[in-house]
Every structure is written in structure tokens, then in C-alpha cells.
């Protein structure tokens, strides 16, 4: 490392940075007692004062910016970032996030926050999955390449020191939320090797991820945290350099949910012996379980040392035991948190993530030279929604604000399209009232309807609603003290206390239920304040809902006045699809669909902008609306990026990283993990889709001129090298995403219809041409041979397909592959 330190400068050899790493770990382990070693197995690792070892916390969320630390830069949700198809963008975001993590690490007195639990690279083979927003899409090559760059950015480029330690999750075959802590994914060896494991292999072997997190589910009946695959493949085959950590409380769930073992000490022993090193659970339970497992002889000191060696290897590489002068990341300061360059990067990421799905009649971009009346409509038009793993936004720019920021000579009309309602108690015959204070309680005391008695009703579909007070613009919130208040600025939380259900009793009489199935109740003995409790079928729990103004009618009126309408629809990340809850369907909520139809009837010059965490089946919109765009949630600069695209200051070039299906009926059951035989993802799906994987338009026209391949016979251990010539044939500068697919011809196996094996995002000026080089390694042509238990390359022909999506193929070339001849 360029420094020479001598033993007499350090009280212990493990503190001497001039010694080899493994020798330092040997010395440290030799100095620890068995009691101390066991106390270092939980993620909250105890201090060892006699050796100068500080307390250390493993963990921290960083899916699209640091979460739960304080105000930090927030980027678009991962499902949107990967729509950029921009590997260098992912690397830069990883670098920025890790810079902020280092700054927070110093704020936390260097106790934790450097072992970051990101990226989430579970394969999103089903769009109903509640955590789709966190994922990198349905293709293991795309997800693996993008994740590898993100990880490289997070961990830094120093040959020894890590800026942060990336921890991809959740290993593996984890793509459903229903019964996630007790279910088993049944996966064949071929599905496992070619699909579910492939993305993790790329993250570790190419991205050099330091750590990995196991999943809650079982695979083929064996819970992931005790599955021998962790040891045999992740550690022995892929050579993971650091440690394996369990997901939160997963260690205890092996007993309480999977019922795989009867005792915690049995689960502890099995986890340790099968490759898990670190345990995210109640430290007391973890320590007690390992003490008992050790005393019973189920594990020995060698087992414990093996785990601690993996943990300390990362702690050393993070620079914990070395002088700051040696570590290039030790001086990263508070100035990196919400740095202006990170805000610019968030802005760029939002731009690059936008996907233009449809653009007939060249309705987009909106002509800025004309003075026009523009209607901005929809429940997402003036929102920037967070998700569970979002950080705290330093600021946010909504779509409406982004449009207003353009300061064009246009008249801008705005409406959410939501109904405005008043709620009258049957018991008091008075209206529910909320006042202007931020923590305004609700009282059933309003004699007349004014702003204090008016609420905006958001209908998210499938019986889910949120209600916001007009008096203080706060959501109704079922608070921990048992009372209902208009007190929430955001819809947020593990338990979404702003989520309500309206259960109709008769005519316009309803029971209003909270997130935990309690009912709004008038407390007549306490000034008619509103609290929530169990259903009693009493008049105190019956409410009449009166519509003050119908949102669709009001929005339709402004649509009729406008030259063009932009309608913002989609989901809320905390409702009808989130961690622990899969989506009930893939369509838009009924109210949103009806709003869109009404707007279009009044004004056919309508643009639909989907802001969502998932693909949507928007069949009516595709058939009728002339222009449709998509982006994911949460970027702090989202509104500015959207306005740039709408008005032509930026040409969209994002591509879909998931297939957009026409109907939920095209999908097998969510627990069906066989993508090969049940036609999942673009690789095997053989029915008509709404929008294919890789789809996305621009404001210009690109011509694919030629493909040159270095050799038409591909021999073992030789790469396919190809050059693609592309031209921007239009008058607008723009990015383009060139995609390279392969298809095996006349295979003895059932092979994919096509597989992505290369992609590049480029920028071309009008009329500019560019040659783009791709290289496909020989092993990328392989398939898993279950009879031999290994990957093989099959002798035969493959077709190289170059296109702008998985269905829009512009150039092809067939090459001969020398491989194994199968009978």
C-alpha cells in the first residue's frame, strides 16, 4: 500500500496495516474469546474495548439513495433507473450514494452504515410482485450488468479499501410477497442456473460485490438461510470475498414461520455451517442460540472463526482498523450529503429513465413556440411519492411544478380529478371537521360545510382510499393513540396508517375502516372526537358521505378548455402492491381509467403519463390515447425531467426492463417459478403483449445501417465481436439504446425466443453516424445441461439480432458455433 508500519507502533499485530490481510485476521481471531466471538455474529456487533474494537453496525438501505439516515439525495426507483439502460449512469449513482454514506458514517461516530443492503436484484418475472419497484427487471443479463456497475460505484476503485460494501439481495428465487416468510419456490436446476442465480453470479464475479443477503423464502423446501447452495455456489464456486447476512428476523423465522427446525440453536448451527456469517435479528436471541449450539457440540470454534473471518475481512477493507491517512475514503465530509452535483445526477437519472411508449400524430413534444392552454390533470400530477426504501427528500419537484418552472407563455389549468366530499356522522348529524393545525384532530361537530369539512378522496382501487383535508392539506391518519387526525404530509410507513377502506352499508351510508381493520367511531363523551376501534355496528360508526364536487366532471370541464391535456396516473407505492403485499391486478384503478376516458372524450389531444412502480395493462389507453409515457417514482427532480420531455428539451430514450402484458390472464400463478415451461418473460412468452421488453421511442428516427461480425465460426473460448453502425436520421439530437439479442437455431433444448447479450446507450446529433462495438464471450452462449450438471455450449447456429427492442429487430446475422454435439 506504499506505507511501512512497524510492530512497535501498534499494540496488536492486527492493527498493523503493513501485514497481509489474512495474517491480521489470524491475529485478531486468536485474541478473541469464544464468548466475544459469538457476540460478534449479530449485525449489531459489540465493542471489544480491551482490543480497541469499536461497536459496529452491519446494514443500511441504499436502493436509490440512502434511506432512514436523514435528508439525502433521492434518485428514481430502481425499476425506473434500469429503464435508462445506462451502465455508466448506474456507476455514477453508486459513487454518489457511497459518498453520502461515508459522510453519514462520520456523523455516526464511525459505528455503522458502510455495509449497504443494495442492490435488490431478485428477478421480476411477475409484474404482480409487490417489490417490483426495487428490482432491476425481468432479464438477468440486463440486471446483472446494471447491478455490477452500481456495485462498482458503491465500492470504489481502490485495490484494497472499500468505500462501502455492497450487499445484493435477496438470494434467491424471491419474487412473491404472499407468505414470503414460509413459502417455498420450486425451481428446476436449469431455471435456477440460467435465470435465478445468473444475476447474482454477475453481481459477485463481475461487480465484485463484497457481501450478499439471503431471502426469506425456501427453495425446493429448504429455507435460503440454511440452504447448502449458499456455501457451495456463492462461496466455493463464485468466491464471494466477504460475508453472507440474513434478511431481517429471518433467522428466527426459520423456526417460527418455516417450522424447519424446532429450536433456534438448531437453526443457528445449520445457518452457520451452510454459509451464513452474520445474523439480522434480536442480538440476544442470536447470541443465546449460538451459545447453546456451541455447548451442544453442533458447531465448533472453526465454524465460528470462518464466519468472523468473512466479516472482519470487510471491516478491515472498510478501513476501520487503519490510520485515516491510508484510506482514500476516510475524509469524505458532510459536504457530500445532498451535494449539488448529486442533485444534477438525480435530474439526469430522471431524464434518462423516462420511456416514451407511444407517440402518434407527433403530439409530442409540445410546441413551445405556440401559446397554448394546457390542462394538467390527475391524482399524481402534483405529487412526488416516496416508497419504503426512499430517503428523506431535500426537496421535490412535482410534474405540475416542473411544467410551471418552464415559465412558458401558456395558460396552465390543474385538477386532481378526485372527488371532494363531506362526511356526516349518523350519531351527531354533524360533519367531520379538521382544522388548519398540522395535527388537527377530527371532530363530528360541523354544522355547515366549509373548508374545514371538505376532504379530497383518492380512490386507489380495490377498496383502498386516502382522504386529505382541504383545511390543512394533510392526510387522515389513524394514530397510535387511537384517534384519527388530519396529520400526515405523506402516505408512508410499514403500517400504512393513511390507508382507508369505505364499506357501504346502504345507499350513501358507510363504515370507514383503518389499515388495521378498525372503524372510525364518534366518541360522544369526548367532544365527539373521532377515534378508531373494533366494529360494533353502532350508529357511532356510521357515516354519510356527501359528494361536494365530482372530480371527473370538474377535470372534464378544464379539459374542454385546453388545447392539450396531460394526465398523470399510476400507483401509490404504499398501496395495493408493496413489501408484504402483491398486486391484485395489473390494470389501472377503475376511477383513474374512467377519468382518462372522460378527459379524452372532451379533448382527443391527450397525453397519458404513467408514474408507477410496475408495468400496467393499459389496453384502452394504447388503443385511444395518442401519446403515452412512463416513469417510476421518487426522484427529487422528477417534475423537471418530465417537463423537459413534454416540451422537447430532452428526447426520451428509456427502454422497458419488463414486459407489459395485456392482461393478468396471460400470467400463470405467481408461485409458478418455471419461466421455461410456463412461458414467462420476453424470453419464453409467445402471446401478444402490450409493450415488449426493451421497448421505447424517441423524438427522432434512427437507422440501423450495418452489422459486421469478426468471424462467422465461433470456436471455444473465442468471443463474438461485432460492430453495429447506427445513424440519427432525424433533426433532433437524442440518445438511442442499441440492443443485441441471440437466438439458438434448431436446438435440442427448449431455448429462449431471444436473449439479451449486449446493450449500449449512445448519443447522436442529427445526421450523425456511429459505430458501436460489442463483444459476446463464448460462455454467454451456454445453457445448463441437467444430465451433466454443468453449463455447455451447444454445437449449431445462433442468430445475432440487433434492434431497438426485443421485437423491433433491425439487423440479423447468423454464425456457426463450435460446441458439444448433443443427441
Image (cartoon, rainbow, N blue to C red):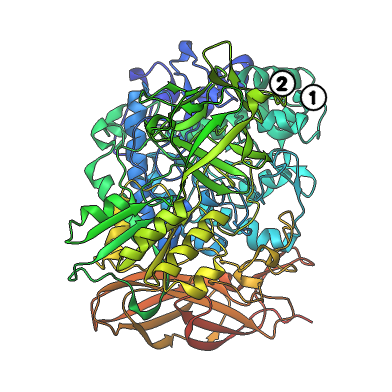
- In the depicted view, which residue is nearer to us: 674 or 193? 674
Q: Residue at x 53, y 41 (%)?
A: 574
Please say if 401 is above or below 822. above
571 left or right of 364?
right
Residue 707 locus on image (x, y percent): 42, 87
Q: How many marks?
A: 2
94 left or right of 374?
right
Q: Identify the mark nearer the N-term, 1 or 2.
A: 1
Mark 2: secondary structure: helix
Q: Marks 1/2: CA distance?
A: 8 Å
Mark 1: secondary structure: loop
Q: Residue at x 51, y 24 (%)?
A: 27
Residue 586 locus on image (x, y percent): 60, 58
The outermost residue toward the right is: 262
Q: Toward which corner of the image does residue 662 lie, by quadrant?
A: bottom right
Q: Quadrant of the N terminus?
A: top left
Q: Give the numbered dot on residue 36.
A: none
- In the depicted view, which residue is nearer to us: 220 or 820? 220
- In the depicted view, which residue is nearer to us: 565 or 684? 565
Residue 397 locus on image (x, y percent): 30, 47
Please say if 107 is above or below 612. above
CB atoms of marks 1 and 2 within 8 Å:
yes
Please say if 795 is above or below 446. below
468 left or right of 342?
right
Q: Residues within 10 Å of mark 1 (few under 14, many from 20)?
A: some
The residue at which mark 1 appears reads as: 263
Residue 396 locus on image (x, y percent): 31, 43
Q: Quadrant of the C terminus?
A: bottom right
- In the depicted view, which residue is nearer to us: 41 or 182? 182
Is any part of residue 464 visible from this angle? yes
Please say if 821 is above or below 126. below
The residue at which mark 2 appears reads as: 289
Amino acid at each position: 500500500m506504499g506505507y511501512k508500519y512497524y510492530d512497535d507502533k501498534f499494540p496488536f499485530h492486527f492493527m498493523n496495516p503493513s501485514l497481509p490481510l489474512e495474517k491480521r485476521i489470524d491475529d485478531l481471531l486468536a485474541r478473541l474469546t469464544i464468548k466475544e466471538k459469538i457476540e460478534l455474529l449479530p449485525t449489531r456487533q459489540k465493542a471489544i474495548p480491551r482490543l480497541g474494537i469499536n461497536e459496529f453496525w452491519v446494514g443500511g438501505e441504499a436502493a436509490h439513495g440512502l434511506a432512514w439516515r436523514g435528508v439525502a439525495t433521492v434518485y428514481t426507483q430502481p425499476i425506473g433507473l434500469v429503464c435508462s439502460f445506462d451502465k455508466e449512469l448506474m456507476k455514477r449513482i453508486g459513487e454518489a450514494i457511497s459518498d453520502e454514506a461515508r459522510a453519514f458514517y462520520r456523523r455516526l461516530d464511525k459505528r455503522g452504515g458502510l455495509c449497504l443492503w443494495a442492490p435488490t436484484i431478485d428477478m421480476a418475472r411477475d409484474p404482480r410482485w409487490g417489490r417490483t419497484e426495487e428490482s432491476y427487471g425481468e432479464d438477468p443479463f440486463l440486471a446483472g450488468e446494471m447491478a455490477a456497475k452500481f456495485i462498482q460505484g458503491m465500492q470504489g476503485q481502490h485495490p484494497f479499501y472499500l468505500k462501502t460494501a455492497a450487499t445484493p439481495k435477496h438470494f434467491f428465487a424471491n419474487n412473491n410477497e404472499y407468505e414470503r416468510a414460509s413459502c417455498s419456490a420450486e425451481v428446476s436446476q436449469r431455471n435456477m442456473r440460467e435465470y435465478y442465480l445468473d444475476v447474482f453470479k454477475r453481481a459477485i464475479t463481475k461487480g465484485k460485490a463484497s457481501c450478499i443477503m439471503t431471502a426469506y423464502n425456501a427453495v425446493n423446501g429448504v429455507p435460503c438461510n440454511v440452504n447448502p447452495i449458499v456455501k457451495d455456489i456463492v462461496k466455493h464456486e463464485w468466491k464471494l470475498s466477504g460475508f453472507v447476512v440474513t434478511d431481517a428476523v429471518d433467522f428466527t423465522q426459520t423456526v417460527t414461520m418455516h417450522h424447519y427446525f424446532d429450536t433456534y440453536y438448531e437453526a443457528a448451527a445449520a445457518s452457520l455451517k451452510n454459509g451464513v456469517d452474520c445474523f439480522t435479528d434480536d442480538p440476544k436471541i442470536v447470541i443465546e442460540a449460538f451459545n447453546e449450539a456451541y455447548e451442544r457440540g453442533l458447531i465448533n470454534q472453526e465454524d465460528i472463526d470462518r464466519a468472523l473471518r468473512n466479516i472482519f475481512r470487510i471491516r478491515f477493507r472498510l478501513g476501520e482498523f487503519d490510520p485515516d491517512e491510508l484510506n482514500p475514503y476516510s475524509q469524505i465530509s458532510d459536504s457530500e450529503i445532498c451535494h449539488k452535483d448529486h442533485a444534477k445526477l438525480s435530474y439526469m437519472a430522471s431524464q434518462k429513465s423516462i420511456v416514451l411508449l407511444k407517440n402518434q400524430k407527433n403530439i409530442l413534444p409540445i410546441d413551445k413556440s405556440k401559446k397554448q392552454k394546457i390542462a394538467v390533470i390527475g391524482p399524481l400530477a402534483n405529487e412526488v411519492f416516496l416508497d419504503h426504501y426512499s430517503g428523506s427528500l431535500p426537496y421535490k419537484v412535482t410534474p405540475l411544478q416542473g411544467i410551471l418552472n418552464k415559465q412558458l407563455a401558456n395558460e396552465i389549468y390543474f385538477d386532481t380529478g378526485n372527488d371532494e366530499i363531506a362526511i356526516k356522522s349518523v350519531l351527531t348529524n354533524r360533519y367531520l371537521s379538521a382544522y388548519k393545525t398540522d395535527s388537527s384532530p377530527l371532530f363530528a361537530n360541523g354544522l355547515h360545510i366549509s373548508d374545514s369539512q371538505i376532504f379530497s378522496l383518492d380512490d386507489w382501487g380495490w377498496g383502498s382510499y386516502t382522504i386529505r383535508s382541504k383545511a390543512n392539506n394533510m392526510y387522515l391518519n389513524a394514530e397510535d393513540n387511537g384517534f384519527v387526525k388530519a396529520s400526515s404530509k405523506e402516505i408512508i410507513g410499514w403500517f400504512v396508517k393513511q390507508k382507508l377502506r369505505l364499506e357501504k352499508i346502504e345507499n350513501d351510508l358507510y363504515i370507514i375502516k383503518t389499515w388495521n381493520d378498525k372503524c372510525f367511531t364518534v366518541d360522544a363523551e369526548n367532544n365527539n372526537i373521532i377515534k378508531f376501534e373494533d366494529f360494533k355496528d353502532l350508529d357511532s360508526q356510521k357515516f354519510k358521505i356527501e359528494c361536494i364536487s365530482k372530480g371527473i366532471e370538474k377535470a372534464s370541464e378544464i379539459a374542454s378548455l385546453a388545447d392539450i391535456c396531460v394526465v398523470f396516473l399510476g400507483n401509490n407505492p404504499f398501496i395495493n402492491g408493496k413489501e408484504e403485499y402483491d398486486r391484485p391486478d395489473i390494470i389501472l384503478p377503475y376511477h383513474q381509467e374512467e377519468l382518462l376516458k372522460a378527459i379524452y372524450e372532451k379533448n382527443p389531444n391527450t397525453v397519458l403519463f404513467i408514474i408507477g412502480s410496475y408495468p400496467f395493462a393499459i389496453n384502452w389507453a394504447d388503443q385511444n390515447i395518442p401519446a403515452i409515457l412512463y416513469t417510476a417514482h421518487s426522484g427529487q427532480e422528477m417534475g423537471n425531467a418530465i417537463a423537459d420531455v413534454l416540451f422537447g428539451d430532452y428526447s426520451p430514450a428509456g427502454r422497458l426492463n419488463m414486459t407489459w402484458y395485456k392482461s393478468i390472464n396471460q400470467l400463470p400463478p405467481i408461485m409458478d417459478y418455471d419461466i421455461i415451461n410456463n412461458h414467462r418473460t420476453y424470453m419464453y412468452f409467445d402471446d401478444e403483449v402490450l409493450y415488449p421488453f426493451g421497448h421505447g421511442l424517441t423524438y427522432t428516427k434512427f437507422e440501423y445501417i450495418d452489422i459486421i461480425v469478426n468471424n462467422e465460426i465461433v470456436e471455444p473460448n473465442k468471443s463474438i465481436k461485432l460492430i453495429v453502425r447506427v445513424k440519427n436520421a432525424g433533426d433532433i439530437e437524442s440518445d438511442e439504446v442499441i440492443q443485441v439479442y441471440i437466438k439458438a437455431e434448431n436446438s435440442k433444448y427448449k431455448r429462449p425466443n431471444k436473449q439479451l447479450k449486449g446493450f449500449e446507450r449512445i448519443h447522436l446529433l442529427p445526421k450523425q453516424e456511429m459505430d458501436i462495438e460489442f463483444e459476446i464471450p463464448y460462455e454467454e452462449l451456454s445453457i445448463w445441461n441437467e444430465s451433466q450438471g454443468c453449463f455447455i455450449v451447444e454445437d449449431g447456429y445462433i442468430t445475432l439480432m440487433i434492434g431497438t427492442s426485443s421485437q423491433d429487430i433491425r439487423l440479423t446475422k447468423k454464425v456457426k458455433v463450435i460446441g458439444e454435439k448433443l443427441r
